[in-house]
Amino acid sequence: MELLDGKGLANQLKAELAEKVKALLAAGGRAPHLAAVLVGDNPASLSYVRNKVRSCEQSGFRSTLIQKDASVTEAELIEIIKGLNNDPEIDGFIVQLPLPRHINADNITLAIDPKKDVDGFHPVNFGRMAQGLSAYLPATPFGIMKMLERYNISTSGKHCVVLGRSNIVGTPISILMSRRGEPGNATVTLCHSRTKNLEEYTQKADILIVALGIPNFIKPEMIKEGVVIIDVGINRVEDASRKRGYRLVGDVDFENVASRCSYITPVPGGVGPMTVAALLLNTMESYQGKIYSGAS
Ligand code: GUN
Protein backbone atom coordinates (compact mmCIF):
# COMPACT_ATOMS: atom_id res chain seq x y z
CA MET A 1 0.00 0.00 0.00
CA GLU A 2 1.23 3.46 -0.89
CA LEU A 3 -0.20 6.65 0.55
CA LEU A 4 -1.17 9.32 -1.97
CA ASP A 5 0.45 12.30 -0.30
CA GLY A 6 -1.81 15.14 -1.38
CA LYS A 7 -0.23 17.54 1.05
CA GLY A 8 3.29 16.95 -0.26
CA LEU A 9 2.18 17.05 -3.89
CA ALA A 10 0.16 20.23 -3.33
CA ASN A 11 3.23 21.84 -1.74
CA GLN A 12 5.27 20.83 -4.78
CA LEU A 13 2.67 22.30 -7.17
CA LYS A 14 2.53 25.51 -5.13
CA ALA A 15 6.34 25.74 -5.17
CA GLU A 16 6.27 25.34 -8.98
CA LEU A 17 3.69 28.14 -9.17
CA ALA A 18 5.81 30.33 -6.86
CA GLU A 19 8.73 29.93 -9.29
CA LYS A 20 6.51 31.00 -12.19
CA VAL A 21 5.28 34.04 -10.26
CA LYS A 22 8.86 35.01 -9.43
CA ALA A 23 9.69 34.94 -13.14
CA LEU A 24 6.59 37.02 -13.96
CA LEU A 25 7.55 39.65 -11.38
CA ALA A 26 11.17 39.68 -12.54
CA ALA A 27 9.91 40.39 -16.06
CA GLY A 28 7.98 43.40 -14.73
CA GLY A 29 4.58 41.72 -14.61
CA ARG A 30 2.09 41.55 -11.77
CA ALA A 31 1.18 38.57 -9.60
CA PRO A 32 -1.96 36.49 -10.30
CA HIS A 33 -4.83 37.58 -8.07
CA LEU A 34 -7.52 35.32 -6.58
CA ALA A 35 -10.51 36.65 -4.65
CA ALA A 36 -12.79 34.65 -2.35
CA VAL A 37 -16.23 35.61 -1.11
CA LEU A 38 -17.26 34.08 2.20
CA VAL A 39 -20.78 34.49 3.55
CA GLY A 40 -21.58 33.75 7.19
CA ASP A 41 -19.49 31.97 9.80
CA ASN A 42 -19.63 28.26 8.91
CA PRO A 43 -16.46 27.00 10.66
CA ALA A 44 -15.51 24.51 7.91
CA SER A 45 -15.94 27.16 5.19
CA LEU A 46 -13.87 29.63 7.22
CA SER A 47 -11.11 27.07 7.52
CA TYR A 48 -11.20 26.23 3.78
CA VAL A 49 -11.09 29.89 2.77
CA ARG A 50 -8.23 30.62 5.19
CA ASN A 51 -6.33 27.73 3.58
CA LYS A 52 -6.92 29.22 0.16
CA VAL A 53 -5.62 32.62 1.27
CA ARG A 54 -2.56 31.03 2.93
CA SER A 55 -1.83 29.03 -0.20
CA CYS A 56 -1.97 32.19 -2.31
CA GLU A 57 0.71 33.67 -0.07
CA GLN A 58 2.86 30.53 -0.43
CA SER A 59 2.66 30.79 -4.22
CA GLY A 60 3.25 34.54 -4.40
CA PHE A 61 -0.32 35.21 -5.56
CA ARG A 62 -2.31 38.20 -4.43
CA SER A 63 -5.50 37.32 -2.61
CA THR A 64 -8.55 39.27 -1.54
CA LEU A 65 -11.04 37.95 0.98
CA ILE A 66 -14.50 39.50 0.98
CA GLN A 67 -16.44 38.47 4.09
CA LYS A 68 -20.15 39.17 4.45
CA ASP A 69 -22.56 38.55 7.28
CA ALA A 70 -25.07 35.70 6.79
CA SER A 71 -27.77 38.37 6.46
CA VAL A 72 -26.42 39.63 3.11
CA THR A 73 -29.12 39.55 0.42
CA GLU A 74 -28.86 37.71 -2.88
CA ALA A 75 -29.01 41.05 -4.73
CA GLU A 76 -26.14 42.46 -2.66
CA LEU A 77 -24.07 39.36 -3.32
CA ILE A 78 -24.73 39.61 -7.05
CA GLU A 79 -23.54 43.24 -6.97
CA ILE A 80 -20.28 42.09 -5.34
CA ILE A 81 -19.90 39.44 -8.06
CA LYS A 82 -20.48 42.01 -10.81
CA GLY A 83 -17.75 44.16 -9.25
CA LEU A 84 -15.33 41.22 -9.32
CA ASN A 85 -16.35 40.31 -12.88
CA ASN A 86 -15.43 43.81 -14.01
CA ASP A 87 -12.29 44.31 -11.94
CA PRO A 88 -9.31 43.99 -14.31
CA GLU A 89 -6.99 43.29 -11.35
CA ILE A 90 -8.83 40.10 -10.37
CA ASP A 91 -7.95 37.02 -12.43
CA GLY A 92 -10.42 34.69 -10.80
CA PHE A 93 -12.71 34.39 -7.83
CA ILE A 94 -14.82 31.93 -5.91
CA VAL A 95 -17.91 32.16 -3.76
CA GLN A 96 -17.47 29.62 -0.98
CA LEU A 97 -20.34 27.15 -0.65
CA PRO A 98 -22.64 26.39 1.09
CA LEU A 99 -24.54 29.69 1.16
CA PRO A 100 -27.31 30.62 3.63
CA ARG A 101 -30.72 29.23 2.69
CA HIS A 102 -32.20 32.57 1.59
CA ILE A 103 -29.63 32.80 -1.21
CA ASN A 104 -30.14 30.73 -4.35
CA ALA A 105 -26.70 29.26 -5.06
CA ASP A 106 -27.58 28.65 -8.73
CA ASN A 107 -28.27 32.37 -9.25
CA ILE A 108 -24.91 33.16 -7.68
CA THR A 109 -23.03 30.70 -9.88
CA LEU A 110 -24.78 32.02 -12.98
CA ALA A 111 -23.75 35.59 -12.11
CA ILE A 112 -20.03 34.72 -12.23
CA ASP A 113 -18.24 35.52 -15.49
CA PRO A 114 -17.21 32.07 -16.86
CA LYS A 115 -13.80 33.56 -17.71
CA LYS A 116 -13.18 34.22 -13.99
CA ASP A 117 -14.94 31.11 -12.70
CA VAL A 118 -11.85 29.38 -11.35
CA ASP A 119 -14.08 26.98 -9.38
CA GLY A 120 -15.41 25.69 -12.71
CA PHE A 121 -18.98 25.70 -11.40
CA HIS A 122 -20.61 27.84 -14.12
CA PRO A 123 -22.61 25.77 -16.63
CA VAL A 124 -20.48 27.21 -19.45
CA ASN A 125 -17.35 25.71 -17.89
CA PHE A 126 -19.17 22.54 -16.90
CA GLY A 127 -20.48 22.11 -20.46
CA ARG A 128 -17.08 22.81 -21.98
CA MET A 129 -15.54 20.26 -19.63
CA ALA A 130 -18.16 17.66 -20.59
CA GLN A 131 -17.46 18.23 -24.28
CA GLY A 132 -13.68 18.03 -23.83
CA LEU A 133 -13.14 21.72 -24.66
CA SER A 134 -10.67 23.80 -22.65
CA ALA A 135 -12.38 24.79 -19.40
CA TYR A 136 -11.72 25.56 -15.78
CA LEU A 137 -12.11 22.15 -14.16
CA PRO A 138 -13.81 22.11 -10.75
CA ALA A 139 -11.03 22.25 -8.17
CA THR A 140 -11.58 18.93 -6.37
CA PRO A 141 -11.90 16.78 -9.52
CA PHE A 142 -8.99 18.67 -11.09
CA GLY A 143 -6.89 18.01 -7.97
CA ILE A 144 -7.75 14.30 -8.12
CA MET A 145 -6.78 14.10 -11.81
CA LYS A 146 -3.46 15.85 -11.06
CA MET A 147 -2.77 13.41 -8.25
CA LEU A 148 -3.44 10.36 -10.48
CA GLU A 149 -1.26 11.93 -13.19
CA ARG A 150 1.70 12.74 -10.94
CA TYR A 151 1.61 9.31 -9.30
CA ASN A 152 1.47 7.67 -12.75
CA ILE A 153 -1.61 5.67 -11.82
CA SER A 154 -2.96 4.12 -14.96
CA THR A 155 -6.71 4.61 -15.42
CA SER A 156 -7.21 3.53 -19.03
CA GLY A 157 -9.66 0.64 -19.31
CA LYS A 158 -9.99 0.45 -15.52
CA HIS A 159 -13.33 0.25 -13.75
CA CYS A 160 -13.75 3.47 -11.80
CA VAL A 161 -16.64 3.57 -9.34
CA VAL A 162 -17.69 7.01 -8.09
CA LEU A 163 -19.88 7.32 -4.99
CA GLY A 164 -21.83 10.57 -4.89
CA ARG A 165 -23.35 12.67 -7.67
CA SER A 166 -22.85 16.27 -6.51
CA ASN A 167 -22.21 18.99 -9.07
CA ILE A 168 -18.87 19.83 -7.49
CA VAL A 169 -17.32 16.37 -7.15
CA GLY A 170 -19.17 13.17 -8.11
CA THR A 171 -20.70 14.19 -11.43
CA PRO A 172 -17.67 16.08 -12.83
CA ILE A 173 -15.10 13.45 -11.75
CA SER A 174 -17.23 10.75 -13.40
CA ILE A 175 -17.12 12.77 -16.64
CA LEU A 176 -13.37 13.43 -16.41
CA MET A 177 -12.51 9.80 -15.67
CA SER A 178 -14.50 8.60 -18.67
CA ARG A 179 -13.23 11.32 -21.01
CA ARG A 180 -10.63 10.52 -23.64
CA GLY A 181 -7.18 11.10 -22.15
CA GLU A 182 -4.80 9.98 -19.44
CA PRO A 183 -5.86 10.10 -16.68
CA GLY A 184 -9.22 9.15 -18.16
CA ASN A 185 -10.38 6.42 -20.54
CA ALA A 186 -11.88 4.59 -17.56
CA THR A 187 -15.16 2.71 -17.52
CA VAL A 188 -17.15 4.66 -14.96
CA THR A 189 -20.04 3.66 -12.72
CA LEU A 190 -21.68 6.50 -10.81
CA CYS A 191 -23.43 5.33 -7.62
CA HIS A 192 -25.61 7.45 -5.33
CA SER A 193 -28.13 7.31 -2.51
CA ARG A 194 -30.67 5.36 -4.61
CA THR A 195 -28.18 2.75 -5.82
CA LYS A 196 -29.24 -0.77 -4.82
CA ASN A 197 -26.69 -3.33 -3.60
CA LEU A 198 -23.89 -0.78 -3.49
CA GLU A 199 -21.29 -3.37 -2.47
CA GLU A 200 -21.73 -5.16 -5.79
CA TYR A 201 -20.26 -2.06 -7.44
CA THR A 202 -17.65 -1.08 -4.88
CA GLN A 203 -16.27 -4.65 -4.84
CA LYS A 204 -15.69 -4.48 -8.60
CA ALA A 205 -13.88 -1.12 -8.53
CA ASP A 206 -10.26 -0.85 -9.65
CA ILE A 207 -10.45 2.82 -8.69
CA LEU A 208 -12.96 3.93 -6.04
CA ILE A 209 -13.70 7.64 -5.60
CA VAL A 210 -15.81 8.33 -2.53
CA ALA A 211 -17.56 11.68 -2.11
CA LEU A 212 -20.50 11.00 0.18
CA GLY A 213 -19.82 12.96 3.36
CA ILE A 214 -20.46 9.92 5.57
CA PRO A 215 -17.64 9.22 8.06
CA ASN A 216 -15.95 5.79 7.76
CA PHE A 217 -18.58 4.51 5.30
CA ILE A 218 -16.32 2.24 3.23
CA LYS A 219 -15.44 -0.94 5.12
CA PRO A 220 -12.85 -3.58 4.15
CA GLU A 221 -15.40 -6.13 2.93
CA MET A 222 -16.75 -3.58 0.43
CA ILE A 223 -13.57 -3.42 -1.67
CA LYS A 224 -11.33 -5.53 -3.86
CA GLU A 225 -7.73 -6.24 -2.87
CA GLY A 226 -5.40 -3.80 -4.67
CA VAL A 227 -7.98 -1.07 -5.31
CA VAL A 228 -6.94 2.59 -5.63
CA ILE A 229 -9.06 4.67 -3.23
CA ILE A 230 -9.58 8.42 -3.45
CA ASP A 231 -11.36 9.61 -0.31
CA VAL A 232 -12.97 13.02 -0.82
CA GLY A 233 -14.77 13.11 2.55
CA ILE A 234 -13.76 15.65 5.16
CA ASN A 235 -15.94 14.92 8.17
CA ARG A 236 -15.63 16.42 11.63
CA VAL A 237 -16.24 13.83 14.33
CA GLU A 238 -16.28 14.64 18.03
CA ASP A 239 -13.05 13.81 19.82
CA ALA A 240 -12.69 15.02 23.39
CA SER A 241 -9.00 14.07 23.38
CA ARG A 242 -8.26 16.81 20.82
CA LYS A 243 -7.81 20.41 21.87
CA ARG A 244 -10.35 21.64 19.32
CA GLY A 245 -12.86 18.93 20.32
CA TYR A 246 -13.02 17.13 16.96
CA ARG A 247 -10.88 15.32 14.43
CA LEU A 248 -11.20 14.99 10.68
CA VAL A 249 -12.03 11.64 9.13
CA GLY A 250 -12.79 10.63 5.58
CA ASP A 251 -15.62 8.58 4.06
CA VAL A 252 -13.37 5.51 4.22
CA ASP A 253 -12.64 3.47 7.35
CA PHE A 254 -8.96 4.13 6.72
CA GLU A 255 -7.63 2.14 9.65
CA ASN A 256 -9.21 -1.12 8.46
CA VAL A 257 -9.22 -0.51 4.71
CA ALA A 258 -5.78 0.95 3.91
CA SER A 259 -3.77 -2.30 4.02
CA ARG A 260 -5.98 -3.82 1.27
CA CYS A 261 -5.37 -0.96 -1.19
CA SER A 262 -2.59 -0.40 -3.70
CA TYR A 263 -2.96 3.35 -3.15
CA ILE A 264 -5.14 5.40 -0.81
CA THR A 265 -5.47 9.08 0.09
CA PRO A 266 -5.30 9.94 3.79
CA VAL A 267 -7.69 12.39 5.48
CA PRO A 268 -6.47 14.98 6.25
CA GLY A 269 -3.58 15.48 3.84
CA GLY A 270 -5.02 13.82 0.73
CA VAL A 271 -7.59 15.38 -1.58
CA GLY A 272 -8.12 18.56 0.51
CA PRO A 273 -4.74 20.20 -0.18
CA MET A 274 -4.94 19.13 -3.85
CA THR A 275 -8.24 21.04 -4.18
CA VAL A 276 -6.54 24.24 -3.08
CA ALA A 277 -3.54 23.68 -5.37
CA ALA A 278 -5.92 23.06 -8.29
CA LEU A 279 -7.69 26.35 -7.58
CA LEU A 280 -4.35 28.15 -7.83
CA LEU A 281 -3.53 26.33 -11.08
CA ASN A 282 -6.86 27.55 -12.50
CA THR A 283 -6.09 31.09 -11.35
CA MET A 284 -2.72 30.95 -13.09
CA GLU A 285 -4.44 29.70 -16.25
CA SER A 286 -6.83 32.62 -16.07
CA TYR A 287 -3.92 35.04 -15.60
CA GLN A 288 -2.26 33.58 -18.68
CA GLY A 289 -5.52 33.76 -20.65
CA LYS A 290 -5.18 30.11 -21.55
CA ILE A 291 -8.66 28.68 -21.24
CA TYR A 292 -10.53 31.12 -23.45
CA SER A 293 -7.76 32.03 -25.87
CA GLY A 294 -8.60 29.89 -28.89
CA ALA A 295 -11.75 29.44 -30.98
CA SER A 296 -12.81 26.63 -28.69
N1 GUN B 1 -17.50 24.12 -0.80
C1 GUN B 1 -17.00 22.86 -0.78
N2 GUN B 1 -16.11 22.70 -1.77
C2 GUN B 1 -16.04 23.87 -2.42
C3 GUN B 1 -15.29 24.32 -3.55
O1 GUN B 1 -14.49 23.60 -4.17
N3 GUN B 1 -15.50 25.61 -3.92
C4 GUN B 1 -16.37 26.42 -3.28
N4 GUN B 1 -16.54 27.66 -3.73
N5 GUN B 1 -17.10 26.03 -2.25
C5 GUN B 1 -16.92 24.77 -1.83
Image (cartoon, rainbow, N blue to C red):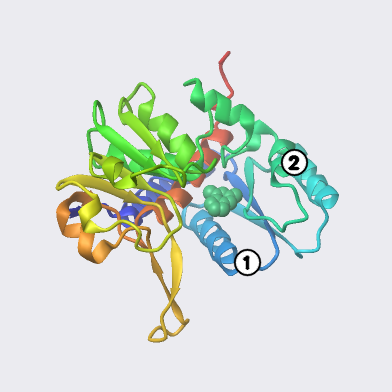
Q: Secondary structure at mark 1?
A: loop
In the rendering, at what x and y percent does residue 57 appear? 52, 58
| Number of residue marks | 2
Amino acid on which disc 2 is placed: Asn
Residue beneath the point at 67% across and 43% down? 90
Q: Is residue 133 above or below residue 60?
A: above
Quick one: which residue is furthest to the front in this view? 196
Amino acid on which disc 1 is placed: Asn
Residue 44 found in image quarter: bottom right
Q: Which residue is mark 1?
A: 42
| 170 or 196, nearer to the observer | 196
Query: In the figure, is residue 79 to the left or right of 221?
Result: right
Q: Which residue is mark 2?
A: 107
Q: Quadrant of the C terminus?
A: top right
Residue 167 found in image quarter: top right
Q: Is residue 67 above or below residue 289?
A: below
Residue 69 found in image quarter: bottom right
